Image: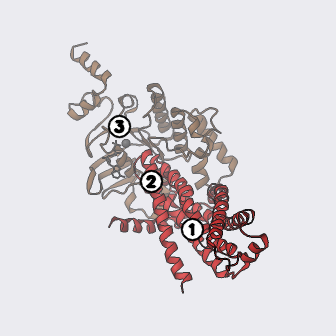
Amino acid sequence: MFYLDDIGRYFLMIKGVFSRMTKGSVLRTLIFKEIDDLIIGSIGITVFLAFFIGAVVAIQTALNLTNPLIPKQLIAFASRQSVILEFAPTFISVIMAGKVGSFITSSIGTMRVTEQIDALEVMGINSLNYLVFPKIIAMLMYPFVIAIAMFVGIFGGYIAGVYGGFVSSSEFITGLQDEFVPFHLVYAFIKTFLFAFLLATIPSFHGYYMKGGALEVGKASTAAFVWTTVVIVISNYILTQLLLSA
Amino acid sequence: MIEVNDIHKAFHGEEILKGITTTFHRGKTNLIIGTSGSGKTVFLKCLLGLFTPEKGTISYDGENYSELDEEEKRRLRQRMGMVFQGSALFDSMTVEENIMFPLKMFTRQKKSEMMDRANEVIDRVNLENANKKLPSEISGGMQKRVAIARAIVTRPKYLFCDEPNSGLDPNTAMVIDNLIQEITVENDITTVINTHDMNSVMEIGEKIIFLKKGFLEWEGDKTQIFKTDNEAVTNFVYSSNLFKKVRKAQLQGF
Ligand SMILES: Nc1ncnc2c1ncn2[C@@H]1O[C@H](COP(=O)(O)OP(=O)(O)O)[C@@H](O)[C@H]1O
Ligand SMILES: [Mg+2]
């Protein structure tokens, strides 16, 4: 199985990232740049997606609640649960595997094919630490993006529910407060941290170890998107099993 | 001086360097020539310590690389400069930032000191009005100058250049070759240059080794290369059209 080989190399890469640190003042600049590229640059698309996903979830729930005995506030409850538990952390992360992931793979991959990584190594710099560590640190801010997505998603549900005439504003607000389990938020953010780490490292792996030229950079970006998504979906399943179904 | 003794390097079981022994001299431009795929880049990356040979030793002024500990290796590495084939400038940094980068990473100099040193090498390689530009905004010849400036900013004792004039017009190529040679002499650097360009051979070939399929096929200097009867070398030398015509003229007794 050649995947086993890659998994081994992935963990060796992680080890390499955390050894022989780059000079602090240089790292700081790099981290700020990554926060700008990876986090700030993702907020716009996240807000846009989260709003409409939340809106659709509310409408779908409303349209499927045909039994008059079920209270309308369930629309809010269902929107809240699906947005917090899955749509914000998982769905947005899959989108980010495309956006952030392909950006990371293509930027590191380009540095590989143009020998910029060799140039770093020749200077005696640990290129893995220099390139990947700032991305991991920047992605520690990723939960903020997901928190925004949760908020905006529920807001989207409110707008669609109330202005679509499915539920009254006060029913929606009551529904939002129904049976709130704080652990669900903990669960969502544990997932988010893991996904943030995967989003930073799997695309880096594909860029760092790529071979070839410009064409291969494109292929590596696609492979990075697919693999990041696959690993996110699988680890989502495992974490959900471990944390929620006890 | 770099002494190379019986270097072997393989990838996935395929031997690319098959036992190379030679010496590169200080204050001289040492050339590695050979057709594409003959192993020049791999050899240069072995000299740089980017690849570890399976067998053989490389000594830098008496220091055997494989016997050094990690810290000593890093210190030796910092005395090396490298000009990559495609320049390998950091494309998110300006010309000035590229050149100051090695200083910023490895010295405790003040910003003004770094600037002074950067401007010194910028002057030396004749880069004018490019300090604030990005690599993508300057010509290939200028990029090469930046790459040279970045390689020499830390005052290395060893300078390696991989096809420094590939992609340049003949005139610029010659200027770059001469620049490298002058810097080599001025600073008493051991310079090793990969090339398949006969113009460079004639211009700066103080010591030449010819690689063929991973073997060292021939060594000599730029006058000897026109006298050898080694077939692979003469084929290489006279593969250029101009030289073919000169050769024909010579044979006809001009
Ligand atoms: N990192 C590598 N992994 C596997 N094979 C390599 C690697 N680098 C170079 N090679 C192979 O080594 C041979 C010599 O390449 P190279 O040294 O680049 O030749 P050139 O003389 O044109 O610089 C080529 O066949 C190339 O495919
Ligand atoms: Mg080459």
Vertical placement of residue B1 versus A100, above or below = above
- Which residue position is annotated with label 2? A220
Q: Residue furthest bottom?
A: A246
Rendered location of residue B20, percent (x, y): 28, 48
Task: Pick the quarter of the image with the C terminus of chain A.
Answer: bottom right
- Label the red chain with its letter: A
Judge whether residue B79 can be spotted in this image: no
Classify mark 1: residues with Cα within 10 Å, few (<14), some (14-19) or many (20+).
many
Tint of chain B: brown
Q: Chain of mark 2?
A: A
Which quadrant of the view contains residue A84?
A: bottom right
Q: What label sits on residue A42 in the rendered view?
A: none
Vertical placement of residue A103 versus A231, above or below = above
The amino acid marked with disc number 3 is Lys
Task: Name the element at disc 3.
Answer: strand
Comparing marks 2 and 1, which lies closer to the viewer? 1
Instruction: Tell which circle, 2 or 1, labels the residue nearer the N-terminal end.
Output: 1
Q: Are marks 3 and 2 on the same chain?
A: no
Task: Name the element at disc 1.
Answer: helix
The amino acid marked with disc number 2 is Ala
Q: What label sits on residue B207 in the rendered view?
A: 3
Q: CA distance from mark 3 to mark 2?
A: 41 Å
Judge whether residue B41 can be spotted in this image: yes
Task: Name the element at disc 2.
Answer: helix
Of residues A91 and A117, the one nearer the viewer is A91
> Going 62% across and 35% down the picture, which residue do you hit?
B130
Rendered location of residue A72, percent (x, y): 71, 75
Q: For this view, does A129 lie left or right of residue A34?
A: left
Q: Chain of mark 1?
A: A
> Going 65% across and 55% down the picture, which residue do you hit?
A41
- Which residue position is annotated with label 1? A90
